[in-house]
Amino acid sequence: MNTRERFLAITAGQKVDRTLKWEMGYWGGAVRRWYNEGLPCKKGILDSIPDGGTVMGEDITIDPETMNPVDAAERDTDVSEYFGFDEPIWRVPLNNYVCPQFKEEVLQEHETTILMRDKYGVHVLNQKDKNGFPHWVETPVKNGDDWEKLKAERLQPTLDGRLPDNWDQWKEVFKNRTFPLIFGGYPTGFYGTARFLLGEEKVMMAFYDMPDVMKDIMDYMADLWINLYDQVLNQISVDGILIWEDMSFKSGPLISPAMFRQYILPNYKRLTDCLKSHGVNTIMVDTDGHCSELIPLFTEGGANLLGPFEQAADMDIKKVREEFPELTIVGGIDKTKIKEGKEAIDKELEKVPWMLAQGRYIPHFDHQVPPDVSWEDYKYYRNKLNEMIDSVR
C-alpha cells in the first residue's frame, strides 16, 4: 500500500498492511544536535532556522504554493530517510484565509527585538535571534467595524488570487498522487482563526463582550470555506481537511463546551456535511492541551481524527480509544520521556502495541521533538516504534 492508501484505510477503520511511519516535526536545535551525534547530514537545514524553530516532519503539511528553496529547507528529509518514513501529507495550495494577504513589513526595530506585521495582519514582536516566543502586539480585528472591513476587503468567497498561477499543473500532479491531499491547516479553524483575528486574550472575552461579532465570525468563515472548497472539489479530489484549533491549555479548554456548542458546533456540522457530500470523509482536528471535554463536540461536528494528544496535559490515549472507538488518534508519545533513556522509552512505548491492535492509530511524539532528546535515545525510540508498527498487521 502507498501512503495515501494507508492514510485513507486507517482513518476509515479498514484493514491496512501497517500504520503510517510519521513524525510531527523537530526543533531546529534537536536536528543540529543529532548531526553532531551521528545523524548523516545529506541535506541539512537552513542556518536561519533558530534552535527553537520548526523543522517540519511528515505530519505537517507540504503546501505546494510555498514549495521554494526556503520551505524545502524547513522540511526534514535526513531523519525521514534514515528511518524510512512514509511520504508527508500535502495541502491543497488554496489560500483559504485573508486574500490578498497583508504586506509583511518591519514596523519597529530595536537592539534585540523587531516588530513586524505578518501576512495575516498581526503585529508580532520577535527576538532578533528568533529563539524567544513571539508576542502579539496587535491583531486586525478590534471591533465590529474592523471585522466588516476585513470581510469586504480580504475575505470574499472567490477563487481569484487564491490559487497559484500554475494551478492547472498542480491538478495534473494530484491526479495520480500517492500521498494524502487535504484542505486547511494552520491558521484556519473556527476558534483558531478567531485567535488570529482578535488575539489570544481578547478572543476569550469576545464571546461575552461582542457575542454578535463572534457569531458572525463563526458563521461567515463557515460560509467562506464551504464556498471555496465546493469550487475546488468540482476540479479535483481531496482526501481530508485539517481544522486547526489550538483551544486548550494544560488542564482544560479555553472555551466552555456550552459556548462551543452554541457558536462553533453548528458550523462544524455545516462544513463537514459539505465535505462529506463530495466524498471527503477524513475530518482532522489539530488541538493541543487537555481537550477531553471537547472531543464529544468535535466528533458530533463530524471530526474523526484528532492529535497530538499531549501527555503533559494528561491526554490518555488508551482511555480516549475506549470511549471513542471510531476516532483516529495521532501522536500520544510523551516527548519528555524519550530523553530519559532506554528503560523510560520501553515503558512509554508499552501502550503502543495495544493501540495499534485496535486500529485507527498513527503513533509519534505528542508534539515536535525537543533538543534535550539525544540522537542515541531518539534512534532507540524510533527503531523500536517502527518494529512495533511492522509487527502489527
Image (cartoon, helix red, strand yellow):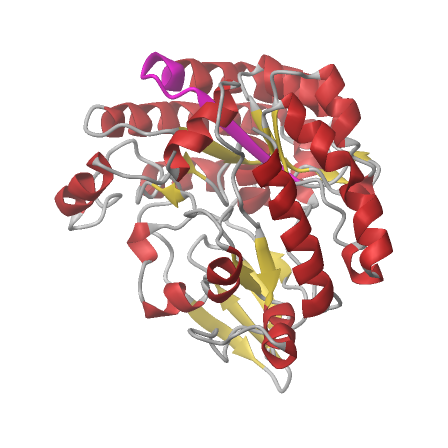
Q: Judge whether residue 270 is colored magenta.
A: no
What is the x, y in percent for residue 372? 75, 68
The residue at 38%/56% (across/down) is 102
The residue at 69%/46% (across/down) is 366
Q: Judge whether residue 276 is colored magenta.
A: yes
Q: Nearer the viewer, residue 104 or 252?
A: 252
Which quarter of the rendering shows the C terminus?
Answer: top right
What is the x, y in percent for residue 116? 51, 68
The residue at 41%/47% (across/down) is 87
Q: Quadrant of residue 263?
A: top right
Q: Nearer the viewer, residue 260 or 367?
A: 367
Q: Nearer the viewer, residue 311 or 381?
A: 381
What is the x, y in percent for residue 65? 30, 53
Which quarter of the rendering shows the N terminus?
Answer: top left
Q: Quadrant of residue 90?
A: top left
Residue 205 vertical placement versus 22 (above, below): above
Q: Looking at the image, can residue 326 be seen?
A: yes
- Please give the range of residues in magenta: 274-287
Extreme residue in the bottom direction: 111
The residue at 72%/44% (across/down) is 333
Residue 284 vertical placement versus 271 (above, below): below
How many numbered marks does the figure carry? 0
